[in-house]
Amino acid sequence: MQDREKVLAELERVKPTHVLNAAGSTGRPNVDWCEDHKEETVRNNVVGTLNLADCCYLKGIHITVFATGCIYTYDEAHPIGGPGYLETDKANFAGSFYSETKAHVEEVSLTGIEKKSTKANHMQIMKFYSNALILRLRMPVSDDLHSRNFVTKIAKYDRVVDIPNSNTILTDLLPASILMAEHKDTGIFNFTNPGAISHNEVLALFKEYVRPDFTWKNFTLEEQAKVIKAGRSNCKLDTTKLINKLKEYNYEVPEIHEAYKGCFQRMAKAGVK
């Protein structure tokens, strides 16, 4: 996506009405990879994303960007169990380079991260493109145990932290992204199921519906910090704007606990173990 001439040539060849951009560097096996590959991360998450959006703008093409909501962390105004972050709230998490490349370029009053932030950065700049729809996913979950599924990841960890977070159940929300693209919606939307769910709650439901013999252990954030290179975002996103928009299309998104039950029931029915 960094090669502008190739992007323009591809858009001219295909002549799409819409572009869906789910590309970017999240790292393998996780975001710790980005800490040691900063140039590549910036080129993919910032330069490439902006370049593709700009090329689509020049061609009059609507673009949907599957972005991230991992740019916030719980604070005094947004404690665990309290209100979620709005689309207009400034990013306040810079614990990982991945999240930094997803933060805010034009806002210079950020506490503590104004000189470092680059990933809500490109999202905030992208909101000025009249052809761009930015959807903030968090911890995406599919109906299988794909390696990138959030559940697959935490089910393989020796220990997990037990903190509530917003999650995105793809079966519920991917159809909504197509609806929004077809209607040429633009701007930033928190793109998660309503509510927040803890890791223990997720794994308890996984045990109940999918893998009855599954067990896990917990550890604290302090203990987690000793085994990871970069920090992890923990937060709840407010989905009011998204839910109100989808009501216009008679589309409903289930609350996260009910959504997980549905997801795991579908897994069980499909024989996923």
Image (cartoon, helix red, strand yellow):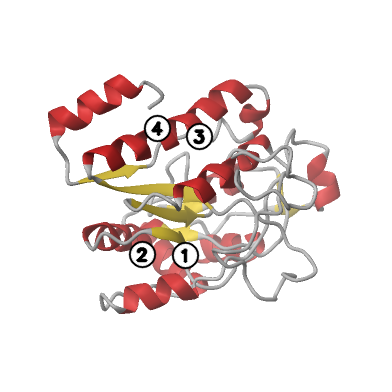
- Disc 3 + disc 1, Cβ < 8 Å: no
Q: Residues within 10 Å of mark 2 (few under 14, many from 20)?
A: many
Mark 2 or mark 1: which comes first in sequence? 2
User: Mark 2 or 3, which is nearer the eye?
Assistant: 3
Query: Residue 105 sits in which quadrant?
Result: top right
**Residue at x 69%, y 47% (from the top left corner):** 232
The residue labelled by disc 1 is 209
Instruction: Judge from the rendering whether residue 31 lies leftward or rightward of residue 220; answer left or right.
Output: left
- Label 4 and label 2: CA atoms lie apart by 29 Å
Q: Provide the secondary structure element on which disc 4 rests.
A: helix
**Residue at x 39%, y 47% (from the top left corner):** 65
The residue labelled by disc 4 is 51
Q: Provide the secondary structure element on which disc 1 rests.
A: helix
**Residue at x 43%, y 62% (from the top left corner):** 264
User: Mark 4 or 1, which is nearer the eye?
Assistant: 4
The residue labelled by disc 3 is 45
Taking 182 as reference, is 108 above or below it? above
Residue 250's tag is none
The front one of 236 and 104 is 104
Taking 157 as reference, is 259 above or below it? below
User: Mark 2 or 1, which is nearer the eye?
Assistant: 2
Q: Position of residue 73 (x, y in %)?
A: 71, 57
- Identity of the amino acid at label 3? Asn
The front one of 87 and 195 is 87
Mark 3 or mark 1: which comes first in sequence? 3
Mark 4 or mark 1: which comes first in sequence? 4
Instruction: Judge from the rendering whether residue 108 lies leftward or rightward of residue 257; answer left or right.
Output: right
Residue 172's tag is 2
**Residue at x 70%, y 48% (from the top left corner):** 108
- Identity of the amino acid at label 4? Asn
